Amino acid sequence: MLSWLLATPGRLYVVATLLPLAVFALLLIGGGVRAVCRPYRETHGFARFCYFFLGGHKPLKSGAYLATAGIAASAVLAVIGLVRFLDDSHALSPIEVEHRWAERTSWAEVGATESGPAIALDLGYRIDHLTALLFAMVACVSTMIFVFSLGYMHDEMEETHEDHEAHVKRPGRYGRFFLFLSLFCFSMLNLLIADNLFQVFISWELVGVCSFFLIGFYHERRSAGLAANKAFIVNRIGDAGFMIGLAIIWTYFGTFNFQEIFTKLASDGPPMPAYLFAIAGIGVFLGCVGKSAQFPLHTWLPDAMEGPTPVSALIHAATMVAAGVYLVGRCYPLFSPDVRLLIAYTGMITLFLGATIALVQTDIKRVLAYSTVSQLGFMMLALGIGGWVAGLMHLLTHAFFKALLFLGSGSVILGCHHEQDLRKMGGLRRKMPITAFTMLVGVLAIAGTPFFSGWYSKDLILSNAMGFALHDNQHMALFIVPLFTAGLTAFYMFRLWFLAFTGQPRDHASEHAHESPLTMIVPLMILAVPSIIVAWGWPLWDPHSSSLAHLLEHAKPGMANGLDREDETHLAGWLALAAAALGVTTAVFIYVLKKVDPASIQAKAGALYGFLKEKWYFDEVYDAMFVRPTIALGFCSARFDKKSTPAAQAEVADRTMNVTSLDGVLNVLGLGTLAIGGKLRVTQSGYIRRYVTVLMVATLAFVAVFVAVYFVG
Amino acid sequence: MENADDMIEHDLILMSLVIFAPAAFGLLVLFFPPKWTEAVRWCALIGAAATLILSLCLLIDYHSLLNRQSDRGLRSMHHPSTQLDARIDESMRRDTNAVRWPQIGDDLVASVPWISRFDINFAIAVDGISMPMIVLTTLILFFAVIASWGIEKNVRAYFALLLVLETGVLGTFFATDLFLMYVFYEIVLIPMYFLIGIWGGGRRKYAAIKFVLYTLVGSVFILVAIIGLYFTNVRDFVDTATVDDRAAERMKENPRLSKESAESREYHTFSIPILQRAGQAAMLRLNGQGDRLADRDSKTEGKVNILGRGVKTEDAINRMNQPFFSANFQYVLFLLLFVGFAVKVPIPPLHSWLPDAHVEAPTPISMVLAGVLLKLGGYGIIRLAYPICPWAAEELSLFVGCLGAFAIVYGAFVAMGQTDFKRLLAYSSVSHMGYVILGFAVWSTGAKSQYWAWGMNGAMFQMIAHGITSAGMFFVVGVIYDRAHHREINGFGGLMTTMPLYGGLSAILFFASMGLPGLCGFVGEVFVVLGTWNYNPGLAIPAILATVVTAGYLLWTWQRVYLGVSTNPVNSTYPDVTAREAIVLGSFCLLAIALGVLPQTLVLAWMEPSVTAQVEALAKLKP
Amino acid sequence: MTELGLTPYLCLGAFLFCCGLLCIATKRNAIGILMGVELVLNAANVNFVACARYVPQFALEGQVFALLVIVLAAGEAAVALAIILNFYNNHSTVDVDKADELKG
């Protein structure tokens, strides 16, 4: 085992990936055995032993510790792996690195014929700078979030937990939470190390299903169930596009391996018609649109906030939603210039959309959710305009500060006894100082304050956008909108912070708020550090010399070179800073100095306010355009297929002709036969004489016909 | 490898045991006193378990057969001599050689004359196409017996019928003789009729009659095709020695036979491999490539070696003026076989019997119906319709593919509109079996034939996966039906809270049915879709988009049944699954996970060589 | 004496057959119908025997079948009379028109 592990350094990553899976399997088996034994605990000694050994009625704490230990071990391995990989990539040639840090094995092979060997679907890993960095980030952030959850999910430790929203009493589900988190970590890490699209797709769906279960964690609440379904189905739409992309790639490249595809592309160009290449790119991108909550499939992400806050932090802010961005970066050569433009515009629309809606939300988690949508839009935009490094760097920095912000909001929510409405908070700075301070770090980072990590990445994105826009004037919007949105971002983030932490408590919940326990504060403090320093480089004040950017530069696909038209004058950076400053100032005016009453603005711009408050009416429109028609179509097809009848009338219905449904039409065949039989029945009179006469006449007729045919013919 | 003294055909004994062991146990339970219901159940369980174990032994045998010929290279399990056609040919040669060589006892091919006047044999064999179906059958039946523990009405007759049903299904999968296959195929019908008609729900008689009538219509189509096949003279596809042997025998039996009819050397058979060769020759002739025909031992490149040894190509071509080798006959034959089996699959619009039968059948019977009986249809198409009429199959492949894609989409939408849990599952079966049909249809040749191989393998895998998930899902419904005594989706709610273990296990099956990676449903679907794009993107896109609808209706059901809080207080009093139920559900879940994670090791390794070989044999008919 | 040839025998057979058939078709009395059946059978017998005499291939078959028919006729008469008796016991008549329980 150990020798297998040491044979190739890359296997470190395999172990780090599989550890959470092992934990998941252990927890699953343990929970399953306990549940099976539960009804027999009174009657069977062995069942009793198993049941109480595995925790009995109370949720098992050790499972959560095991899961945390598992992911912590993964994080340690990830950091070791990162260091060793950076060493190797310095010292060794690319071929040697490839040899030491990539392996694959076939998962299914089909089609070995005399004319050729089988084509195989592979599983494998390949580590490059991008994977190594993201892997370390995911593992470390996950560890922090696991530790945080140990405290945050403490309610679930109770033997009977009362859900105040759904008004039910149920057993606590502490273990189940960590079970799904572990599975999620495995899937996410697997997604990152995958060396082929197929493996990415597998992990893609798996993270989706983990997200489904975690959003629906409080499944007694109707809203949670609906949100979970929405998330999964919307993602499925994206995944259908992904699948189309996969099918095209499979048909024309015959492989899913990234390196093989890119080599083929680099040497011979796309082996298919240009439009198909574009469709393949759009298909893969559609998958990313779904997962990264981009317009028009962004509607699921805010609803996903129904899940527990650590889930929002881990899955719906730091890692899973970023997977779409990661995949766009990974598959970069698959996108033709047109598709890249599409990506850029999608990003632009999304970032604006998200920011505007975030302006007026009052639920602390929803503000953060829309800010996530908006930031993901920034990343997509960057990738679309050729800023490969900028987009992925923002992905990394955003993961840290957004996880921090979400965990901070979790701390606030717990402190305020599950109150999430910003309007009822206020003055929490004194009651929860550490939370307030760490969240301020996050807010400063996301607003793009100099020397915080967000500044470096956002600056890079905007200077890329400016370069792109200057080069091609008709795409000026791609620079103006993000610039404006940078100001909005600063405004709504500070609005959140001011509303929550400054002023006087506006509700008894915030009056009786208290600082959270150590297990929750320590992760906050730890996460605050990378939120500041992760993108530092030398000189510190030059955003373009971030060391993170230099590391990412190594992983950049060859074709992305020369696409980035970085603006060297730092003008974009200064403009962004100005916009952010403007945003902060406005926030200070409105929420601290109270020069302007927000209510009066609401009253003046009532229609706009309503429009934003209702999230641009996307949900309503989709509901009317897609959901209802689909369900209606379902019921219509069901009616077309078969007319259902109540059981009482079934006997009659079976005997009546009914041609309004497919089943009815087929039944008519049977009923018709029955009717003809009924008519023919009369001829069976029972009189022998008649039978014999018919027989005679028929025979004579036959003879006559034969004779006639014989003589005439 | 062979031992001349070894005259015992071990494989005949083993295969016959697998086929008839269930029926034997079924008869045995009839001799129990009526009061011993518990003993009857255990006896049936032992019977089903014995069959399962025997079939697994057979699987190991088959695996070692492949392994013996393995060249440890890239095509390690693909040795041509392990193919069914080659093995049966070898067996026939041994049988009719002037100095009869002993049969080999481990080639998993066996034939015993049954009605020799018409050359009807009790001919059975296994290969990679039938083997998975056989194991699936024994597996599902084993769990169905466990699931039948709650049956109280006339227990002896119930288990006897169930086990006889198993014999019928297994026989159909084993048979390499059309007549034998047809007989077994029909045997399935009778127990099923009674099982639905006696142990079913409120409208059981209606459902049972509907099931029988629809299936009988299909059977009639098949019967006509079989008769048509039998009346074809296939002497060119059998070794000349065998034909001479047969003629001499005829002369000996009937000395008054006129010289000409004895000399005409007509050869009629029900043997599936021989008919497959004839069909392939028909395809070559209709494509104007008759000159590519060559006898089996010929080594020339680019030839199709399907003629019997000693047959001259020119003579064979000259003799191809029978109706069998005409385009119309091939069309009719294909349509007869295809439609006959399509009823069983079922493909819309011939699926109307399925929802009724499912809704009325008791839980274990629904499991068998969805898990096993539907596979008879798919098996018939891949075993008979495609190889025997390849020309028509190729000409009509777009039509077949469209039917498959239509079934996928139509089934999914109709399922969405159901309010009865079981009926919803019945339509989801229609939708999932559509992938099977689509996978068969994606005919491609030359280097692209690999994509067809993906489609075919995907279709086969989808049959296995659907067998497991649908049987599991029907059991899921059965569990809740036992408690609630209704199946209205809207009447449930909050079961995840009330019955957490049940909810957890159901979740795995739901997602397996939805095609989540890592679970069995995914493998088949993705193989089929990957194979389809190459054939026709217009078919691939609906198949892909239907996955969204599938997720839609399954998750909607999931939400209504398991999530939330039930408005009906009764729902919160249901006890969680018992150990017996947990074993069945857990086993299905384990199978779903195992097949989803390790498809290559568990299934593809031994299934794929046969399926791919069939694809290869058919694909090379049209370069 | 010259041979009569096959034709007269066949004509006789046909005549007998027609008589029998008419008898079956017109009689309402069960005994009468039975007699009609006997006539039909004997018409066949005449043909068999005649063929045995005149057609070489059927030399043996014709006689064998004639014997078979005679045996069959005897059996049939026994069974039919038993049925008629039973029928008479139940309906106090041998009028076949009264036997209409199997009417569709």
Image (cartoon, helix red, strand yellow):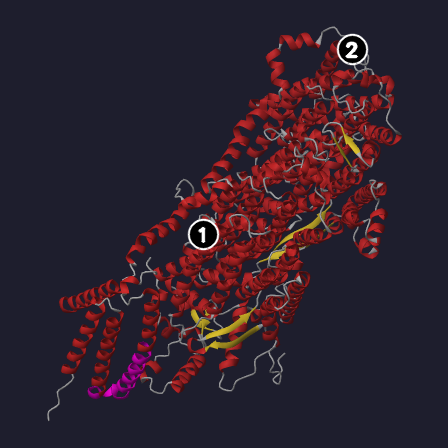
Position of the C terminus of chain B, as image quadrant, is bottom left
- Residue B30 position in % (x across, y down): 60, 66
Instruction: Return the chain for callout 1.
Output: B
Hey, what amino acid is under mark 1?
A: Val
Q: Which residue is mark 2?
A: A592
Q: Is residue B126 above or below residue B366?
A: below
- The numbered mark at residue B400 is 1
Front-most of A76 and A689?
Answer: A689
Q: Quadrant of residue A291?
A: top right
Front-most of B179 and A391?
Answer: B179
- Residue B307 position in % (x across, y down): 44, 73
Q: Kindly state the secondary structure of the residue where label 1 is placed.
A: helix
Position of the N terminus of chain B, as image quadrant, is bottom right
* Horizontal arrangement in the rendering, residue A296 relative to residue B564 (left or right): left
Hey, what amino acid is under mark 2?
A: Val
Residue lying farthest to the top in this orientation: A595
Magenta extent = C53-76
Residue lying farthest to the bottom in this orientation: C1
